[in-house]
Amino acid sequence: MGSASFSWNLVGDFQQMWSYPFMVNAFRAGATVAVVAAAVGWFVVLRRQTFAAHTLSVVAFPGAALATLAGFALSLGYFGFCVAAALALALLRRGREPGGSGESAAIGIVQAFLLACGYLFMALYKGLLEGPQTLLFGSFLGITTGQVTTLAMAGVAVLGVLAVIGRPLLFASVDPQVAAARGVPVRGLSVAFLVLLGAATAEAAQITGALLVFALMVLPAATAQVLTARPGLSLLLTVVLGFAATWAGLVAAWFWPYPLGFFVTTIAFALFLLAHGARLLSTALANRIASATIPAGAA
Amino acid sequence: MNLYLASAGANAWSQPFFQHALLAGTFIALAAGLVGYFLVLRAQVFTGDALSHVAFTGAMAALAAGYDLRLGLFTACILVALLLAGIGRRGKADDVVIGSAFAWILGLGSFFLTLYTTSASGMNDGGAGVRVLFGSIFGLDAGQTLVAVLVALGVGVAVMFLGRPLLFATLDESVAAARGVPVKALGLAFLVLVGITAGEATQAVGSLLLLGLLAAPAGAAVRLTDRPFRGLALTAGLAVAEMWAGLAAAAWIPRCPPSFSVMAAASLVYAATYLRRPTTRRSRTVTA
């Protein structure tokens, strides 16, 4: 971080960066997190559950704070809190219309209360001087090989479950009524997906920090779904975009002394804006072609 | 034990910092409750969430540039509120678009935080980020309290003024639009009010927790009554009572941050509404 200067000798730059084991670990962890977050995030965007995703991602912060205070493993705190919050959200949304006023209020209250708990844990634990900002905004320094292995195993588990429930979940997300009529367990899938989302955010929060997991989940998926409506293609595009933004962010954070989260979100948001611009341009072009071929009176 | 607690409480009550917190807190809770009620009815809590994070970025940007923190808070919140209302249809933006925008704004916030804590003026102020994120209501001085009270009063009056047409536009948008209610303009004005409230409440409970102040009293009131104006009054009452309970708890319990006790009181009240049998909800669940 700021220890090297950027030159246009790209190969040399890359070799220098790659010669540090912690950087190699950062790239490996970043790749895992990006792929898992993108795959889960694709369903989040499809199901319009961004608020729930944001809530689960910030809940990683009180989990980590409690783990620090009580002295147990950080991963346990992350996973425990995120999965518990996912179950709480699933319980609170029972019998509500999705996206209705009652549900969004309930999500907001869960989020605010758990964050307040995180603040309390932090206040009780006096030794945490630099802690909160690292927990919230993440740090890619000092990721050990053991952590990379843990991340990879958790990632494989999440992707495996997603592969199993993927098809019915897609059906239930696109048309819940028809899916329910065809015997797809819509409610069970919705709970399973929230828990999966909790596990994925817990995994991702360990490297990007609680606040920025959300960016990795939403931005690549939102970009891909603007570009194409075909499920398979846009899922693939989401993973590629998330991966590219994370690695580019890591490279940038190596050469400039600003936080990783800033670079990752900026790159991903720039891609999002470009995709929207491209779509606006193409619809404008299509309209012009259409108005040129159809007589003016008919339009 | 009780005597000791009472005397500790009495000490806090006579301190000027506690009186400032009580005064500012009451009005902030009032404004946040009133705005929050419409936020919940319009299912725009996520927009409130986004604006609360914008408040963090705005405050950090102002600190990094060397201005007063509040200037950044209000400017950023109002600008983004206008933007979110502007890009959405009828003054409401899509959740995915809101999420994408504020993910980036958060990243920007972490950038300004680094910029500030590594600059000469912010070097010794490492707690600034935490203060903005989690609030410091016991740190308000007389001048800040006065500004907070005046802004909150302004927001409250504006909500009262917009209340009836806004309620109409919220409950039945199409009919309201057909009857000539300026739905889009109302949505815009309302989000600006949310932005001002977010900037205001950030000083009390911090940008991460202000969502609770917006959503919890209103969420409880919506569960307790279906009548809009009774709900609005109930929200305001609950918000103020929760703020008082939280501040009193923070004064009595050592090492309990006021932001936590206010949130805990608000969440408890909301959870308590689940004990009540939801008789008025039946018609809605049947149609859903």
Image: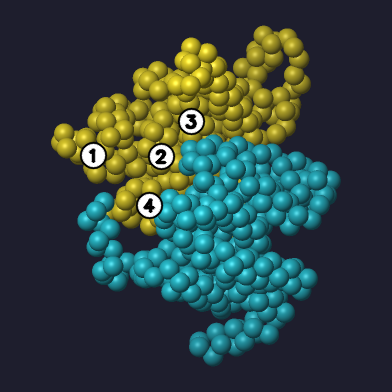
Q: Distance between the residues labelled 4 and 2?
A: 12 Å
Q: Let me know if residue A108 appears in the view.
A: no
Residue identifier under label 2: A48
As drawn, is B217 to the left or to the right of A199? right
Q: Do the residues labelled 1 and 3 touch (CB within 8 Å)?
A: no
Q: Distance between the residues labelled 2 and 1?
A: 16 Å
Secondary structure of residue under mark 3: helix
Residue occupying image coordinates x 64% and y 81%: B12
Chain bearing mark 4? A
**Mark before the other along the chain sequence, 1 or 4:** 4
**Mark before the other along the chain sequence, 4 or 2:** 2
Residue identifier under label 3: A222
Q: How crowded is mark 4: few (under 14 residues within 10 Å), some or many (20 or more)?
A: some
Per the rendering, the colour in which chain B appears is cyan
Chain bearing mark 1? A
**Mark before the other along the chain sequence, 2 or 1:** 2
The type of residue carrying mark 1 is Gln
Vertical side of B274 occupied by A281: above or below? above
Residue identifier under label 4: A100
Tell me the yellow chain. Answer: A
Residue furthest toward the front? A297
